[in-house]
Image (cartoon, rainbow, N blue to C red):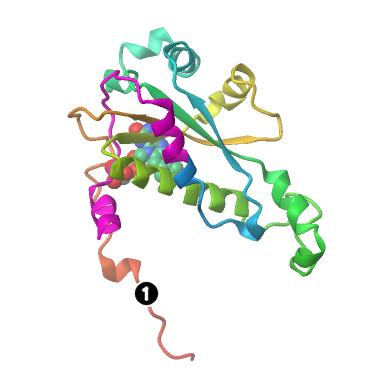
Amino acid sequence: MELQRAMAKRRMVRSFAATPIERSRLDRLLDRSRRGPSAGNTSAVSFVVLDEPTLTTAYWDLTLPEPKRSSFRWTQLLDAPAIVLVLTRPLSYVERYAERDKGRAGLGDDLDGWPVPFWWVDAGAVVQNLLLSVVDDGLGACLFGVFDHEEAVKERFRIGADERIVAAIAVGEPLPDEPGRSAGRPRPPLNEVIRRPGPAV
Ligand SMILES: Cc1cc2nc3c(=O)[nH]c(=O)nc-3n(C[C@H](O)[C@H](O)[C@H](O)COP(=O)(O)O)c2cc1C
């Protein structure tokens, strides 16, 4: 029941109070979030936590520099006391699938042969766990892309060259906000989402 309520309530929040989140509270949320499914239990999803004003300011200075900031609609997104960068290391999956028990999958040579790159799948599960845990804990979150700032962000926050930033997630006490631009798009009807193929022809 609790889970259903958190799932129903979850939405992206784009306005935050600057009130800091206790480090132990944030760590607890991240610990819960990492308990996602993981291909071969590779578990190569990790977090870089920016939870000090100097760090969040540095993030915004890199990704939303002053000239662009004046036209930015969600100014109180920048007040979020924490930004969690969700990382994955694709090569860890190749290494894991080169192990003997995974040999039959034939995915242990390089990054190219993966029909579904499982590193993104694992990271998506962790992201959703985090978004739900945040709601469950009475906080709010907004996920946003790092887009073409990935290399600069990696360099600034000492992230390995072989790691990828899947998403940035702002976390904090939610304030009333304007809905995002995509919020008006209706979710497709259930009968389009759930399909059951008829008997084989
Ligand atoms: C992969 C991904 C990337 C997203 N990127 C952004 C983004 O850059 N900026 C933003 O404001 N919202 C971003 N969103 C949030 C979506 O716009 C939002 O999830 C969607 O409109 C549904 O709204 P809801 O999450 O509030 O239910 C992103 C969501 C996902 C899953």
Residue situated in front as seen by the camera: 169 or 51? 51
Residue 34 horizontal/vertical position (percent): 51, 46
The residue where tag 1 is placed is 195
Q: Going 55% across and 27% down the picture, which residue do you hit?
A: 148
66 relative position to 172: left or right: right
From where the camera sits, is residue 124 visible? yes
106 relative position to 63: left or right: right
Toward the left, the furthest residue is 176
Tell whether position 50 is magenta: no
State whether residue 177 is above or below residue 75.
below
Task: Work out which quarter of the rendered image holds the N terminus and state it.
Answer: bottom left
Magenta stretch bounds? 1-30
State whether residue 56 is above or below residue 91.
above
Residue 180 horizontal/vertical position (percent): 26, 35
Q: What is the three-letter code of the residue carrying label 1?
A: Arg
Question: Callout 1: helix, strand or loop?
Answer: loop
Q: Going 35% across and 34% down the picture, which residue do you hit?
A: 142
Badge 1 density bin: few <14, some 14–19, many ≥20, Cα 10 Å: few
Residue 26 horizontal/vertical position (percent): 41, 32
Q: Quadrant of ligand 1?
A: top left
87 relative position to 93: left or right: left
Tell whether position 22 is magenta: yes
From where the camera sits, is residue 169 visible? no
Toward the front, the furthest residue is 24
Query: How many numbered callouts?
Result: 1
When asked about the image quadrant of residue 165, the answer is top right
When asked about the image quadrant of residue 143, the answer is top left
Residue 33 horizontal/vertical position (percent): 46, 46
